[in-house]
Amino acid sequence: MTLRIFEALVGAGVTLLALGIWLWGIPAWVEPNDFVTVSPDLMPRVAVGAIGALGLMMCLHRLFLEPDRTTPAPIDATSTIMTVIVLGLFAVAVTLMLTVGYLVGGAFITGALTIFMGQRKWWAIALTALCPPLLLWGFFEVLLGIPLP
């Protein structure tokens, strides 16, 4: 399998995942509300629609516009292990968010990914782990009044 075909398959997979979330995920998780002028599912649908459209564009670009047809796909044991580690980190973060709360899960995933990407300075890890979750929590909880888990 060449890199071009691999990336086309990734784009197609992202598109199909976005379509599934659009059709089944958002209606299952977003409750309708008659008291607001903007539907609560607008932003999730815009985000998922954009991700799906970008995945489709990636797939079509790699299939029809990419001239490189010989580079091998980067599928080896190291890449597979790294992918499994990152997926495991996200699974732990989601579990923490659902059981302990958003702030703990958000700080865990941003800190863990910062370390995973090679940052070793404790102050940079602390800033990266704490600031984005606190800012997002403050934006939704304080400004918008939308409680996070």
Image (tube, grey):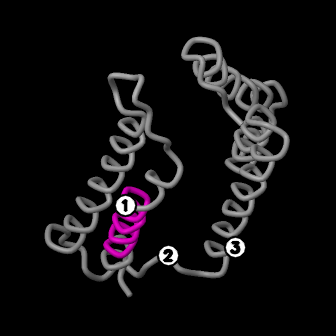
Mark-to-mark CA distance, 3 and 2: 12 Å
Q: Residue furthest bottom?
A: 1
Are circles 3 and 2 on residues that touch, CB within 8 Å? no
Task: Name the residue beneath numbered marker 1.
Answer: 23
Q: Amino acid at mark 2?
A: Pro
Which disc is residue 42 wearing?
A: none
Q: Residue at x 31, y 75 (%)?
A: 4
Q: Foreground: 143 or 81?
A: 143
In terms of depth relative to the viewer, which is nearer, 105 or 123? 105
Q: Who comes first in sequence, dot 3 or dot 2?
A: 2
Q: Which mark is residue 81?
A: 3
CB atoms of marks 1 and 2 within 8 Å: no
Q: Secondary structure at mark 3?
A: helix
The part of the chain drawn in magenta is: 8-22
Q: Residues within 10 Å of mark 2 (few under 14, many from 20)?
A: few
- Rendering coords of residue 125 (x, y %): 77, 32
Q: Residue furthest top?
A: 143
Q: In this image, 43 relative to 137: left or right?
A: left
Percent of width and height locating residue 27: 44, 52
Residue, far left: 64
Residue pointed to by mark 2: 74
Q: Is residue 60 magenta?
A: no
Point out the tag, 1 or 2, that comes first from the N-terminus.
Answer: 1
> Which label's residue is closer to the chain start, 1 or 3?
1
Main SS, magenta region, reads: helix
Find out whether the residues at labels 1 and 3 contact each other: C-beta distance under 8 Å: no
Identify the element where label 2 is drawn.
Answer: loop
